Image (cartoon, rainbow, N blue to C red):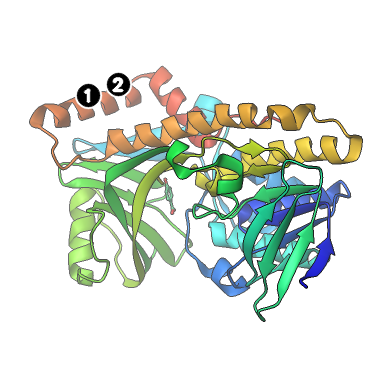
Amino acid sequence: MPRTVRTRVVIVGAGPAGLLLSHLLADAGVESVVLDRRSRSDIESTIRAGILEQETVRVLHESGASERVLTTGNRHDGIELRFDGEGHRIDFPSLVGRSVWLYPQHEVLKDLIAARLAAGQDLRFETEVNSVGDVETEHPWVTATTADGDELRIDADFVVGADGSRSVVRPTVAGPSTGNYFREYPFAWFGILCEAPPSSEELIYSNSPDGFALISQRSATVQRMYFQCDPAANPDALSEAEIWDTLQARVPGTSLATGQIVQRDVLRFRSFVARELRHGRSVLVGDAAHTVPPTGAKGMNLAVADVVLLDCALRALLLENDARLIDTFAETALKRIWKAQHFSWWMTSMLHTAVDASPFDQRRQVGELRSVVESEAGRTFLAEAYTGWPHEG
Ligand code: PHB
């Protein structure tokens, strides 16, 4: 017989979405259990994106989930789009009165895990969920296997799938994968972490005839950079010198500060939205519900927006027996999700070079970039989306 635990909300996945949800629910007195198949150190050390929207920062800070986002994170008031040999700055505060923060996702995770453990959250690492059931009733459950091989059953009032792009909760909520919305791209990013000072004060998104490059940052001594590559590329196939030559050729006009490359990876691009986000007393949030290509850094920000909405809906349902917000959760969340899908697709297609691009396509792309940077309306559109639309809920 499995050991049975009883809680109000069982949250599968201790990523930003799952941990933030447990944190916000606890504030309203709603108890939860969070399960993750990964270890704490894996979660805290996986390198992900680094840009937080202003509203994401506000939620993390005001809820007490992260102090460090403001003390260690860096505010960025703009980005540069570079093409056709010239840089063009998009100044966020003057266009939309907002900014973004550079604060890596694994730092957000460290803060959230520390805050949840300090508050006594039931948070179980290395615990793999096997099945989800009875979500059409008021008493759904999940079963899981712990690191020691023990079987566990968690009875709850609600099940949340916050378990990333390979979600085990997703089939219960969304049905067969054939019904989902999906797009693949013919390119990927070759990403590096290197020990060097910043090469530029702000992020540079560069379209060049050889392909896209992004010069991002992590700290005064560690930088993150990416260049467009073939999705089948082997991250170990290039020498450090070849990596620097490739990056440098794609940001003409900036002399990159180089240094030892301490990590390298190839990130594949996908756009994905699950057909259904809610089924009875189960929902999907974050990457379990949707994936965006990384251009524009919407992934984690979208997860936080889902969670803010779901927190309100679960409080109303579980504390006041009011189902109105949970009944409109999917419809409301999907409006922002599809805007972010569009923005991520648009930034990706505008900035990357398609393998089969004709000279016409290349010139059309530069024309598109020029229409954006030379028009206040164009710059404002980009700045609104990049810094993040207001949250619902
Ligand atoms: C990053 O720093 O990892 C990063 C920044 C901006 C993006 C994507 C990734 O659009």
Q: Cα distance, mark 2 to mark 1?
A: 6 Å
Q: Residue at x 48, y 35 (%)?
A: 386
Q: Determine the image quadrant of residue 115.
A: bottom right
Q: Residue furthest front?
A: 1
Asked whether residue 73 is in view, the answer is yes
Q: Are marks 2 and 1 in contact (CB under 8 Å)?
A: yes
Asked whether residue 199 is in view, the answer is no
Q: Residue furthest left?
A: 359
Number of marks present in the image shown: 2
Q: Residue at x 29, y 33 (%)?
A: 350
Q: Disc 2 designates what residue?
A: 371
Q: Residue at x 22, y 24 (%)?
A: 367
Q: Is residue 9 above or below residue 97?
A: below
Q: Residue at x 47, y 60 (%)?
A: 218
Residue 136, position as x, y percentages in the image: 73, 41
Q: What amino acid does circle 1 point to?
A: Gly
What is the secondary structure assignment of the residue under circle 1? helix
Q: Disc 1 designates what residue?
A: 367
- In the image: residue 38, left or right of residue 197: right
Q: Determine the image quadrant of residue 342.
A: top left
- In the image: residue 233, left or right of residue 301: left
Q: Nearer the viewer, residue 163 or 155?
A: 155
Q: What amino acid does circle 2 point to?
A: Ser
Residue 41, position as x, y percentages in the image: 58, 74
- In the image: residue 363, left or right of residue 273: left
What is the secondary structure assignment of the residue under circle 2? helix
Q: Determine the image quadrant of residue 236.
A: bottom left
Asked if disc 2 is less than 8 Å from ligand 1, the answer is no
